[in-house]
Amino acid sequence: MSKAMDLKTRQKKLIQEARKIWDKQYKDNTRLSQEEYAEYKELMQEIEELKDRIKEEEKLASLEVSLEVSPENSSDNDNNYNKEGKNHRAWIMGIDETKNLNKDGHQVEDRLDEDRLDEGNGELKTSRIENEVIIDDNKDRANGRGNYSLLSRLNRQKQEMTPQPKEETYKGKKILKKKDSQGENGTEKKSSNEDPYRELKSSLHRALIDEIDKETLQKPENDEELELEVKETIESLLEEESKVISAKDKEIILEEILNETLGFGPITPLIEDNKISEIMVNGPEQVYVEEEGKLRLTETKFRDNQHVLHVIEKIVAPIGRRIDESSPLVDARLPDGSRVNAIIPPLALTGPTLTIRKFSEDPLKAKDLISFGSMSTEIADFLKTCVKKKLNIVVSGGTGSGKTTTLNVLSSFIPKTERIVTIEDAAELTLHQDHVVTLETRPPNMEGKGTISMRDLVSNSLRMRPDRIVVGEVRGGEALDMLQAMNTGHDGSLTTGHSNSPRDMLSRLETMVLMAGMDLPIRAIREQIASAIDLIVQQDRLEDGSRKITKISEVQGMEQDVIVMQDLFTFAREGRDSKNKITGKFESTGFASVFLNSIKDR
C-alpha cells in the first residue's frame, strides 16, 4: 500500500497546483493565458492518470494479500497435495492441477513456437519446444510471486491490455499520444468515434497562434485578410507535417481549424446553414438542431466540456458578459443578432449547455410571413394600419412561436420620421429606420453590483423623447412602467409576452404588475391594462412545426370588474395535406372593419 500512498500524495499536490491556477482568474478578474490554460490542462491529465494507477496498485495489493497462505492452513494444504501426489505450490504458481506433473513435481506443457531471449547475446530467437518443463523462480517463494504465479500472470495480462504512452514530436515539442489497441493479428484497431488527427489539430492550432500576425488579429475589420493569412499559415504547417495525409483529410483539417480560430468551433457550419433555425448543444456529445420546425440529432461533437465552455466564452466575451462558476448562466447574442443562452455546471448536470436561436441577417418582412402561411394579406394590411395609427400592440405566444419575428415585422411598419427606442435583455431586433436607439440590460458584475434591469431602462426611456417604445419582452415588474408609458402619451408602443391565448396575456400582465411590488387593487390594474392596450396578436407554433397568427383580439374596455375583448381575426383549421402539414384559412369575424372605422380619425 506504500506505493499507492505515494501516488495519492503526488495526486494531492497536483490538485492543489491545478486549483491555484484555476482560482487565479477569479482573484485577478482576468482570463487564463494560453500558457496557464495549457499547464492547467496538463495537470488535470496527470491527475486522471494517477487515479487509474492508484486503483491498479490497490487492486494488486489486495490480491497479493489474498494469495498469501497462513502457517496453519499451509501444513494442511501441503498434506492434501502430497497425498494426491501433487505440489502445493502449483496452485500459487497458477499451474492447472489437472495437467500431468513430471517426477520432480514440475508441470509438463506442450508449447509451439515461442519467442525467447537468448541470455548470451540478447538476441531474439524462435525455437520449437515440446514437453518443456516450467520451473518456478526461487525469488519471492514465500508468497508465490514467481514468473508463472497467478499475480504475475495477471500483471502481465494487464500490461498487455493497457495502452502505453507513445512519444511523438512536432516542431521539436513532445506530444503525448496513446497507442491504439491491437487486434489479434497485431494490426491497429481504432475506435470509430476517435478522431485520428485530434493531436495533430491541437498542435497545428497552437503553432498557428504562435505564427499568426498579431497586428492582423487586432483589426476586426480586415476579416478577409485575416482569413486568408490564417488559411495560408495552416496550409504551410500541413506541408511541413511529416505524416502522410490525404487531400480530403487536409481539407477537413483546414476547415475545422479555421472554424476554431475565426468561427465558433464545430457549430460554425450549423450557424451558417440558413435552413437551421435553432441549435441546441447538450454537452460535448449531443448537438440538436431545429430544421423546418422539427428537431434532429446531428453528428457534430465537441472534444470535451472544456471545448464547449471555450466556445461559450468566445460568444459572450465580445459583448462584455461572463460565465463561470459564480455566474453559471448568461444571455447573449451572436454578431448577426441571433439569441444565445448558456448554462454550465454545477447548474447543468449534463455539461455546458448552449442554445442558439438564429435570426436571419436580412430580417423577414410581411411578404415573407405571407409566403410561409403565417398570416394572410388581409391581416398584414390590417396590422400595418394599426401600427401607423399608433395603437399599442402586444404580441403573445409560447416559446419558439415566432413572437420576436412578428415584432420585427410590426416595427418595420413604423414611419422613418419617428424616433424609436428599443429595450431588450439581449439586442435581437433589427430595425431599418434611421432614428433608432437600442438599449440593453446589464447583468451584475463579479461583486454582484451594477445590475441594470429592464424596468430601469423603461423608466429611463421616458426621458429620451421617444415617439415609439419597443420592448423585446415583458416578464416582470417592467410591465407596470410599460402600461404607465402607454397611458401617458407614448402611444404606438410594441412589446411581446408569453401566454397561451389573448385572455391569458391579460391575466399575466396583472401578475407582472403585482411583481413590481406595488400593492394595487386588481380593479385598478385591470383598468390600467384596458386603457393602455388596444390589440393582442396571438402567435402559435402548431404540431407540424409551422408558426401562424391564430388570433387577433381587440381590448374594448371594462364592464364591471371584467376586461371585455373581441376577436377580429382567427385561424380555422381544416385538416392536413399529403405532407402531413396543417391546413386552414384565416377568417375575419366581421368586426375588423368596424374597428378600423373607429380608429380612422386617430
Image (cartoon, rainbow, N blue to C red):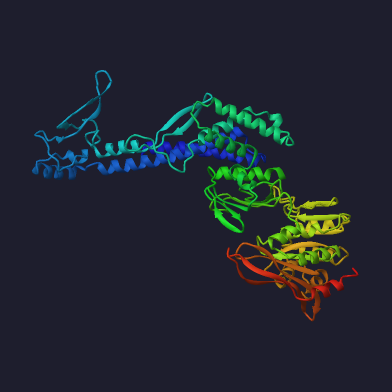
Residue 233 is situated, as x and y percent measured from the top left of the image, at 62, 28
Query: Residue 322: x, y in percent?
Result: 67, 46
**Quarter occupied by residue 429:** bottom right
Tell me if I can see residue 420 in this picture. Answer: yes
User: In the image, what residue occupies the spot 66% across and 45% down?
Assistant: 315
Q: 13 and 179: which one is in front?
A: 179
Name the outermost residue toward the top.
121
Q: Nearer the viewer, residue 366 or 424?
A: 366
- 125 to 367, vertically: above or below: above
- Res. 514 visible in picture: no
Q: Residue furthest front?
A: 578
- Number of on-image labels: 0
Q: Quadrant of the C terminus?
A: bottom right
- Counting from the top left corner in percent of width and height, residue 138 is at 21, 30
In this rendering, position of residue 514 left or right of residue 148:
right
Q: Position of residue 258 (x, y in %)?
A: 61, 36
Residue at 80 percent of width and 80 percent of height: 559
Q: Viewer-proximal residue, 220 or 24? A: 220
The extreme bottom residue here reads 560
